[in-house]
Image (cartoon, helix red, strand yellow):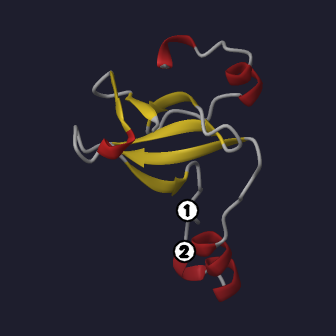
Amino acid sequence: MLLIRCPYCEEERSELEFRWAGEAHIARPENISAISDEEFAEYFFMRDNDKGMVFERWRHIHGCGRFFNAARHSVTDKIHLTYKAGEPKPDEATILAGHEGAAR
């Protein structure tokens, strides 16, 4: 079982309190009605499936109800860092080096 730290509640809880909400840091097209069907499909459906560090959105459904981001290693399933939605994507090398700062 994963233990996930909510950056808003500042508590570590069981994964059962959370729901995965997809890949983080996906930029929405500025004028979505002006893009082609192929560009829309790329934006809406296509996601990376990287081996290694991945950045995901999670929601604390049985807590504060807020969305946040997590840096999780897809091979070990270890969550290295959680941070508030809207904060910039952290540097992967810094996370792996263990320099997570105050955000953890």
* Spot occupied by residue 26 in the image (x, y as percentages of width and height): 59, 55
Residue 32's disc number: 2
Marks 1 and 2 in Cβ contact (< 8 Å): yes
Mark 1 neighbour density, 10 Å: few (under 14) some (14–19) many (20 or more) = few
Q: What numbered label is drawn on residue 28?
A: 1
Q: Give me the residue at 53% from left, 81% from top.
A: 33
Q: Quadrant of residue 31?
A: bottom right
- Which residue occupies the foreground of this view, 25 or 55? 55
Q: Which mark is residue 10?
A: none
Circle 2: residue type: Ile
Q: Quadrant of residue 12?
A: top left
Secondary structure category for the residue under label 1: loop
Question: Alpha-carbon neighbours of circle 2 within 10 Å: few (<14), some, or many (≥20)?
Answer: few
Position above or below: 93 against 25? above
Residue under the point 60% across and 74% down: 45
- In the image, what residue occupies the spot 39% across and 41% down? 15
